[in-house]
Amino acid sequence: MPYQNLSVQLTPQELADIIAALDAIDTFLQGKVINLSMEERQSLYKMRNMRYNFAVRTMNLASSYSEFIPSFANYPDAQRDFAYYQQLAVITQRTNRLAEKIDDTLMAAGSELLKFCLVYYNNVKMALSANVPGADSVFNELNPFFDLPPRPQDDTDTPTE
């Protein structure tokens, strides 16, 4: 369904239920997930499509030809890592899909809000030029948001709160 216009809002109870569900997932995953530093992320091997296929093939071959497993390599740990990777991949696919929908909706809601704000601001400017009482104080409060230096091209950060 193509995006037209948002006309939805969460009830306070729905928002509380969503936050509680996310908290429950976070609590459930404590001790099962980690948070890597930037340096750690850079130093680790990255599992991509071709490397995943390599891992699948290697694990299948190691199962069939265990005589080639070096004595210093821990095959049972590798089996656990492989199974956990596959489980996390399923979770990641679901959460990424959901996060994308939420992010898209956040962008659309923000866009709709800014459209209203710009219409309001432009109307205040027209009221100011017509000397409507009170327009100057509203204009003075909103104008600093428009009296800014040019924004860099790579400014794509979305405020988190």
Image (cartoon, helix red, strand yellow):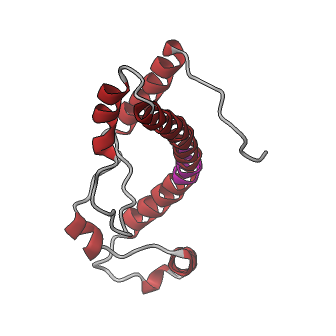
As displayed, is residue 65 above or below residue 135? Answer: below
Left or right of residue 38: residue 83: right
Q: Residue at x 41, y 81 (%)?
A: 69
As displayed, is residue 60 above or below residue 92? Answer: below
- Residue 7, how many percent across, how many down? 66, 28
As displayed, is residue 96 above or below residue 14? Answer: below
- Residue 59, how many percent across, how many down? 52, 74
- Residue 6, how many percent across, how many down? 65, 34
* Outermost residue to the right: 1
Q: Residue at x 32, y 41 (%)?
A: 143
Q: Quadrant of residue 60?
A: bottom right
Report whether residue 56 is seen: yes
Viewer-nearest residue: 128 or 100: 128
Main SS, magenta residues: helix
Viewer-nearest residue: 82 or 2: 2
Dividing the image into 4 quarters, which one contains the N terminus? top right
* Outermost residue to the bottom: 68
Viewer-nearest residue: 88 or 115: 115
Viewer-nearest residue: 55 or 95: 95
As displayed, is residue 138 above or below residue 105? Answer: above
Q: In the rendered structure, does residue 155 fall within the stretch colored magenta? A: no
- Residue 118, how many percent across, how many down? 49, 40
Counting every numbered tag in the picture gives 0
Report whether residue 31 is seen: no
Dividing the image into 4 quarters, which one contains the C terminus? top left
Which segment did they paint magenta? 91-99
Left or right of residue 158: residue 92: right
Q: Residue at x 38, y 69 (%)?
A: 153
